[in-house]
Image (tube, rainbow, N blue to C red):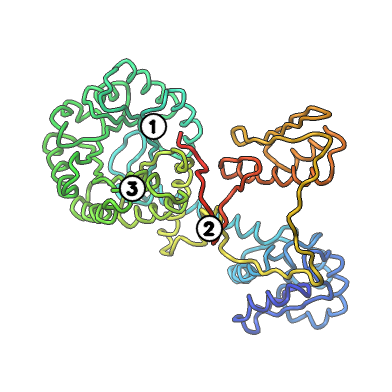
Amino acid sequence: MRVLLITGKLAKPILEEAVKNMGDEVSILALDYPVASLMSIRYILERLKVRKESLSGYDYLILPGLVYGDAKIIEKELGIKTFKGTENAWDVVRVIEALRNGVELSTIYPADVILNTSMIEDAKKILERVEADANYVFDVGFKVPLRPPPFRLLLELDPSHPLDRWIHEIERAKLYVDGVVVGFPVGFSDLDEVRRRVKSVRDLIPVVGIDSDSPYVLREGVREGATLVFNLNEENIEKLEELRKDSAFVVAPFSTENRAELTVSLVRRARLKGFERLIADPVLSPPLMGFTESIMDYAKLRTVLPDTPLMMGTLNVTELIDADSHGVNSLLAVMGMELGVSILLTMEKGKTRWSAWELREATKMVSVAYSQGKVPKDVGIDLLILKDKRRLKVTPPQGKRVVARKLEPEMDKTGFAHIVLDDRRIVVSFTGKKEASVEGEDGLLVGRTLLREVEGISPEHALYIGYELAKAEIAGHLDKNYVQDKPLVRRIGLESYSAQSNSTEQ
């Protein structure tokens, strides 16, 4: 297979570096045009026609991914299979690998579209196969895997929140979790409220667990349809014996000493009493408070209780470390896979909001990678939200540059703009010669609409508004707080940065 990569002058060094280990299989032709993506198909065709004879030895011509037009006309004229490559020149190796594997690329769309779609479809098929082939031990409204993959995810609702807040939380997260856990504070004894809440939650999502220190509350929750009880321990095992056939139980010790041994003892004791559906949880300790030792407890249980599914409360870590939760959740999913923990419990609070989605994506990524016998990288699913895997090499413009200097803004006589995020929607209000409010999710569209609604906004003020709208849009994508005129993110490497709390736990 011989491949010719068509590019412009500026991108040629990047392509040379990317394919330097591919030998004679891949060649590069740089046309006399600086920016590859600005070339048109017609332009490329006219310059290739004069080289027609020298091109006859190639099996494929690969064009820059962003060139304008349909590459089919080049293929018809030259008689050589012609496709568009990737948008980023560094990714051209993926194109070569795809051609080797017989992937049919596109003459219209960049190869990224085809390759990413192919990877995603492959991942979906693997996850479907994982679900079909798993070893399930019992059913609680969903089938419980003995060991992952697959995983099951549970969302614990904050006991301090009112019911309407619970409902809002479930509506937002139910696409990503298999069930929710309703908890009640220590000493809570209003059984009517227990029934009301469990029933309301069950109307929204079929699998409900109940968590309380009171056996009476637990019993009432099971009678109202809860199928998971948190927690069966040395303090209440006798009092919950009457429910042993009605629900599944998470076995978690009340004591903080020798938790692995105590969990094993409790599981065996419960089975002797006729409890059949048991899930073991030796309890994950917070970072620097026994975290590593508690991980070892899960490893012990995986061996000592080979027929019992395990559960891990990831919220004990994500909430108690000041780090972005998606990276922490990704690593916890890997740990869960290696430890044989098939059920993960999370909570969304403050900075851990969207942990349910993060864990769902992380467990899918880990499940696909595990099934393929590879590390969780380049599997079609990822949690790369704030960082990029590869650094783009850019060619800056030549010539003299003017250094930006600090300038005081010129006040706009037309008025001023106030920008806020309202449930991830941008709202800009203009006050002055004309009053106007515009809302939307796309900052560019919001800005354009505002400029049509309010005539005469100065260019400098329009620039400022556009800058702030871009920040607001990014904040909306990340579901992050946005405050006008304040930095949106911390600049990496700036040690003198004084971190300010960017979220209030709610």
Q: Position of residue 183 (x, y in %)?
A: 33, 29
Residue positioned 25% across, 41% down in the render: 279
Three-letter code for the amino acid on which mark 1 is drawn: Asp
Q: What is the distance, in whole Å, between disc 1 and disc 2 at their CAs?
A: 36 Å
Q: Secondary structure at mark 2?
A: loop
Identify the element where label 3 is drawn.
Answer: strand
Residue reaching furthest to the top: 192
Which mark is on residue 496? 2
For marks 3 and 1, the one nearer the N-term is 1
Point out the frontmost of discs 3 and 1. Answer: 1
| Residue found 84% across the figure and 80% down from its top | 51
Q: Nearer the viewer, mark 1 or mark 2?
A: 2
Vertical order, 216 against 309 (above or below): above
Front-most of residues 15 and 379: 15
> Label for residue 158?
1
Quadrant for residue 67, please give it. Answer: bottom right
Q: Is residue 20 left or right of residue 187?
A: right
To which residue does mark 3 refer?
Answer: 342
Disc 3 residue type?
A: Ser
Direction from residue 106 to residue 324 in the image, left or right: left
Label 3 vs 2, first from the N-terminus: 3
